[in-house]
Each structure stands twice: as C-alpha cells, then as structure tokens.
Image (cartoon, coloured by chain):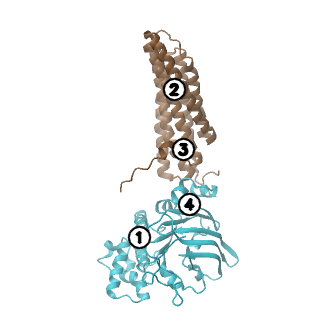
Chain colours: A cyan, B brown
Amino acid sequence: MADFTPHTPDNSHSLQSGHGPLFSIPARHHRLDFVPKIKVNGLSLFYGKAQALYDIGLEIPAKQVTAFIGPSGCGKSTLLRCMNRMNDLIDGVRITGQLLIDEQDINAPDLDVIELRKHVGMVFQKSNPFPKSIFENVAYGLRIAGGSSQTALTEIVERSLRRAALWDEVKDRLDSSALGLSGGQQQRLSIARAIAVDPEVILMDEPCSALDPIATAKIEELIAELKSSFTIVIVTHNMQQAARTSDRTAFFYLGRLIEYKETAELFTNPSVAQTEEYITGRFG
Amino acid sequence: MATHTDKAFEADLNEIRTKILTMGARIEGQISASMYAVTHRDSTLAEKVKDDDLEVNRLEVEIDELCRRTLALRHPAANDLRFITTALKIVTDLERMGDAAVNIAERAIDLNHSTPLQVANGLPRLATLAQDAVRTALNAFVTGNAVAAEEVLGHDEQIDALFVEIFNQMLAMMIENSDTIRRATSLLSVSKHLERIGDHAMNVAEMVIYMVRGTDIRHPRSRSLPRAPQKL
C-alpha cells in the first residue's frame, strides 16, 4: 500500500470543500519500483444493458507509464475514461466495483468531478486547440480556476510549454492562433494545456494516431520525460509505441483484462496465449 | 497456435525455418562425411567436405539477411521475436560446426599421407555422440521441443568425458612411441573438433529452450554475479 505521508495542510489539496480532504495531493516522495497510484477493483461497466468491462482489477504505479492495448472494442478507452469520469457524460452508463486514486474512490457520490479532472488530465486522439492564441490555450485552465496573477500565468505557461517541448518553437509567437500550429505541435500544446494545472495523472487516448513519425517520436520522447513528474496511462493501437514508451502494459480483449505485466516481459514472453496471438499478429 | 493474419510474415518465418533445416542437414552430412574420411582414409570425400562448406557459409549469410529483414519490416514480438533471435544465434553455431567438420576433413587428408595409426577406440563413439547431439538439437528447434533440447545438455557431459579419455589414450601413445606424435596430434585435433561440435549443439539446445519457454538458462553461475554499473 502506498504511503503518501506526511499529509499536511501545506502540501495537500482537497477535491471537495467541506469535511476534510477527499482527495489529497501526495507529498513528493522518492521513486519506488511500484507505488500504486490508481487501483481498479472488480470494475464492470454497462452501456444500458450491454456490458463493456468485466470485473477489471489492476493497479497502476505512480510516475510510470502504463499502456493499455487491445483490438478495437476491447474496452481500453472505456477504462481510461473511467479514470477521470468522462463516462459520466454518456447516458445510461452504469459502473460497479471500485476505482481508487490515492485510495480515494473517485465514483463516490459526493466527489467533486471538476476537481478530480484537475488532478487527472487528459490528452485526446485528435488535438483540440481552442480558437485562441497559443498563450491563452495553455492559460485556459488556470484562468478558469482563477487566483493566478498575470505574472504567475506567464511563468506557468512558459514552464508548461517547456515541459511539453514546444517552447522553443512557439516562444516568438505566443499571441498567434493555436490553429496555425502543425498537428504535432497542436498535440504538444494539448499536453502543455493538460500539465499547466499540475495534474498528478495524465491520461492519453491514442495521442499519436494522427501524427507523422517525427511528431510521434517527439511525443514519445516527451512521455519519457514527463513520467518523472506524472503518472501516465496511454491507450494505443500501436504496439510498438506501447513497447517503446511504457513500463507496464495491460492487454484487454472483449472487455476483459487478459494480461498485465512489465512491458519488456509482455512483449518477449507473454503468459497468456491470447496475448501472444494478439501481439504477434495472429488474431482473426 | 494460429497462423499470422499477415501471410507474408508467416511465409518469411517459414523460409527462415526451412533454410535453417537445410543448413542443419548439410552440416550433419559434413560431420558424418569428415569422420568417414578419417576412419576410411578417404581424401576425396574430405575434399568434398571442404567444398560443401561454401554452401553452408552462403546459407548462413542468407539466413542472417532474412532475419534482419524480418526484424526491420515485421517488428516481431513474443514467440516470433524469440524464434528470430534464436535463429540469428544458432546459425553462427551451425556455421562453426561446419568449420569444425572442415578442420576434421583437413586432418583426414593430412593423416592419409602417413601410415595408418590405430584409431583410438573412443573416437568413433565420440563422433556418434556429437552427431546425435547435433541432430537432437536441430530436431528440437524444428519441433519446438524444449524437453528434447534438455537431452542435448546431458549429451555434452558424455562428450566431454569421452574427449578426456581419448586425450589420455593419445598422450600415453605419444609417450610410448615418439613416432606417433604427428599422427596422434592430428587425431587429438579431430577429437577436439568433435568436442567443440558437441559444445555448439549444446548452445543450440540452450537457445531452443529459450525460444520455447522464454527462459534463458545459459551461464547460471555468471548470473549470480552482481551486474556491472551502467554508464549514464
């Protein structure tokens, strides 16, 4: 069990105002091999009567990259969206079981979902810059949250763009429209926007599927750098990308978790025949 | 296991498997012929063993190229990755077995220029053991049979023991009669090459066990040593 002590008022925030912290930001701690950040216990998900996830159980380590792979319709994106309750936006979705982040049940009825999403950011398949300047795109979340001075905003925007490996390419045109950036730059801008609010977890849903190989390589390099600060979960159809970028990989099929282990082991010596058939291209 | 959805990939893997089988069969023939050349004083056959090595070397290059192409184009994983990395390693062992057979053939030609020397009793038995080890290791590769590969590891101990026995016999012969030194040294060399063939067969068998089970059993004593610090 993760020990994120000491939790003090100085280094903790609450997802919910009121009666004590429901969701705490842990103090920075030394990297351990496997400190669980997210725990999924017996999670099932239904779209109306159709079941999309079956009794999923896995633990995702802090400050590592975890990849979800599997054929279309296997439930990997559905599970990813459970992690910041994006499925709430779909009518008729019902979830049973538990999904804990830092031991907090994120499906608890009194949890502040907006606050949760500040801590669990998301980068989508298609980059989605707002029709605003590059600066305003990154500052957007901070402005909504309020409380940041212009000086602080400027600092955070620069820091976020640097961390997203985009600063050098845009520093002279921060006031230009973000829509003028290339696809790869727009995706890194999305990442800068996600990390500007200093989340703990970043969910990435096929972040490179629309990018060329060079832009993909830049995003993958960025993922490797970001994992020292963030817990990253990435859904990808590109198995080589999962192999290159992740520390652990989970293989899903027809809504079930088939195998979950260290990436190097899964891609060289999977334990389950279904995993082996999928990653060696013997499916269907 | 089902076949690949991508039939061209399946065809590439089958081509690698077939070429390794062809190479293995040629090498078994080389070993057998080179020993026949020693025991039956057949220099013509020994020359043929040397000529056949050109074909074995060509197969090594072809298999290497096929493996590299498959790695680059198909990005194999799991059992396919283990198969191709095993193929890349065992062709080197197979090619060296071929070289050892050529060396035996050269010793045969040299010996045939001298009067016959009573061949050490153990030498034909050593040749049989080495050939059995090669055949068993190659069959294990083709059928993906790790249990059969384990049998080869047992062969190697017998081969090593028999080599020591022959070494002592040859040494005693040379001490007793210095006229035999040149011929006995050649026969010692033949037995050493057979012993090396057994070692290569064991390497193949170890890689087959890795290919089938995903467990690398090589150098168990070295594994317990602390790892050297990695450079940053």
- The residue furthest right is A49
State the CA–CA distance, disc 3 to disc 2: 23 Å
Q: How many marks?
A: 4
Give residue A173's quadrant in the image: bottom left
Q: Nearer the viewer, mark 1 or mark 3?
A: 3
What type is the residue that disc 2 sits on?
A: Leu
At which x and y percent is residue B136? 60, 34
Q: Secondary structure at mark 4?
A: strand
What type is the residue that disc 4 sits on?
A: Lys
Q: Nearer the viewer, mark 3 or mark 4?
A: 3
User: Chain under label 2?
Assistant: B
Residue named by callout 1: A184
Given contact means CB atoms under 8 Å apart, are the residues at marks 1 and 3 in contact? no
Of mark 4 and mark 1, the one earlier in the sequence is: 1
Residue named by callout 2: B194
Q: Is residue A96 above or below residue B175?
A: below
Q: Nearer the viewer, mark 4 or mark 1?
A: 4
Indicate which disc residue A33 carries: none
At which x and y percent is residue A127? 45, 75
Residue named by callout 4: A261
User: Chain under label 3?
Assistant: B
State the CA–CA distance, disc 2 to disc 1: 60 Å
- The one nearer the camera, A4 or B53, is A4
At which x and y percent is residue B107? 46, 19
Left or right: A51 as drawn, with respect to B17: right
- The residue furthest left is A172
Q: Secondary structure at mark 1?
A: helix
What type is the residue that disc 1 sits on?
A: Gly
